[in-house]
């Protein structure tokens, strides 16, 4: 039995559109979105332990170990499966916090998938998705492992085929707290629901991000990044922010835009993925 998995990818996601269609009685917002996996990733080193201890082996600024989604995911799987094994978790952080890229959720999903393999706990993908939902609404998508049309709070998923694309992503240098955006009174909460075919038959950027107007008004840096990137195509914020992206049909076009990004912003390019990269690792 394998005792460790190194360089486990935890990819970022982009919301190609994000509509808020309503609100449940418990306060959670009802959404429709298209999740796109990209090849910009955190990576995790995960080693099994025999003593049942689960620990994070490196420090993360402003993230206490007990509140780290990666650690919480490992402990949740351990409890759920009645597993006596533990784990050493080392996170190599590349994705920004508060960026709308799903970094923490992706780390948790990769932890669940990798430990299910290492510990041989035998949970199905569906069972892992149900477990992941306890940690956050985006976690099931990363376990689902394919680009998806999502509804509900983000957990009702249907696979979609998205174009071969390159993306330029700008980090505006601010963290946008998700609860602040969702609690804003200005937020549109009644966008008319669409059908999956409305999205899949659309050749250009579909819909909008309902959270973008609120975030751009609160955080001028986000607004500035959207306006700058819009000169190269339709620019859009992902998730509740702060990162902003634009899609390009080829790598050369993405490189040309990337070269022009002002130095005050961190920026990078990423390729569209069609499948979670951890799937390949776990099949070997």
Image: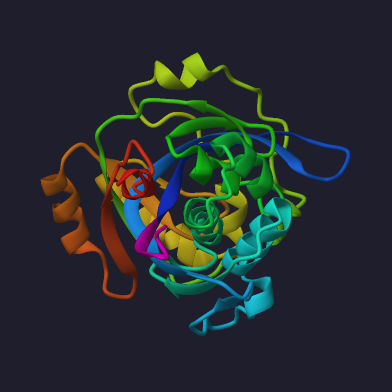
Q: Residue at x 55, y 78 (%)?
A: 56
- Tell me where residue 284 appears, x and y as whole percent: 29, 47
Q: Residue at x 40, y 15 (%)?
A: 201
Q: Residue at x 66, y 23 (%)?
A: 192
What main secondary structure does the magenta stretch of the protein show?
A: strand
- Region in magenta: 1-9
Indicate left or right for 155 with 258 as reference.
Answer: right
| Residue 40 vertical placement versus 65 (above, below) | above
Residue 178 in view (yes/no): no
Q: Is residue 8 magenta?
A: yes
Q: Which of the 4 image quadrants contains residue 122?
A: top right
Residue 76 in view (yes/no): yes
| Residue 60 vertical placement versus 101 (above, below) | below
How are the residues colored? rainbow
Q: Which of the 4 image quadrants contains residue 266?
A: bottom left
- Tell me where residue 73 appears, x and y as whole percent: 62, 60
- Tell me where residue 219 appears, x and y as whole percent: 56, 65
Quarter occupied by the N terminus: bottom left
Q: Nearer the viewer, residue 69 or 103?
A: 69
| Residue 22 vertical placement versus 113 (above, below) | above
Q: Nearer the viewer, residue 255 or 196?
A: 196
Indicate left or right for 268 with 107 as reference.
Answer: left
């Amino acid at each position: 039995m394998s005792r460790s998995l190194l360089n486990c990818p935890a990819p970022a996601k982009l919301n190609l559109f994000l509509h808020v269609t309503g609100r449940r009685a418990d306060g959670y917002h009802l959404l429709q979105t298209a999740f796109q996996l990209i090849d910009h990733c955190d990576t995790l080193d995960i080693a099994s332990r025999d003593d049942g201890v689960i620990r994070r082996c490196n420090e993360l600024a402003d993230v206490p170990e007990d509140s780290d989604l990666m650690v919480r995911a490992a402990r949740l799987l351990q409890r759920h499966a009645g597993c006596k094994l533990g784990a050493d978790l080392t996170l190599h952080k590349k994705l920004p916090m508060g960026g709308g890229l799903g970094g923490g959720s992706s780390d948790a999903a990769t932890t669940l998938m990798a430990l299910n393999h290492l510990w041989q706990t035998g949970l199905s993908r569906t069972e892992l998705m149900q477990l992941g939902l306890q940690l956050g609404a985006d976690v099931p998508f990363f376990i689902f492992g394919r680009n998806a049309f999502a509804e509900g709070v983000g957990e009702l998923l249907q696979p979609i085929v998205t174009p071969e694309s390159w993306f330029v992503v700008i980090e505006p240098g601010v963290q946008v707290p998700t609860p602040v955006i969702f609690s804003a009174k200005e937020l549109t909460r009644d966008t008319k629901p669409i059908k999956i075919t409305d999205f899949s038959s659309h050749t250009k950027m579909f819909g909008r991000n309902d959270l973008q107007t609120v975030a751009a008004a609160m955080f001028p840096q986000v607004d500035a990044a959207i306006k700058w990137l819009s000169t190269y195509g339709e620019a859009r914020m992902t998730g509740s922010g702060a990162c902003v992206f634009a899609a390009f049909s080829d790598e050369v076009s993405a490189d040309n835009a990337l070269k022009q990004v002002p130095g005050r912003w961190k920026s990078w390019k990423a390729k569209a993925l069609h499948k979670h990269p951890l799937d390949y690792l776990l099949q070997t």
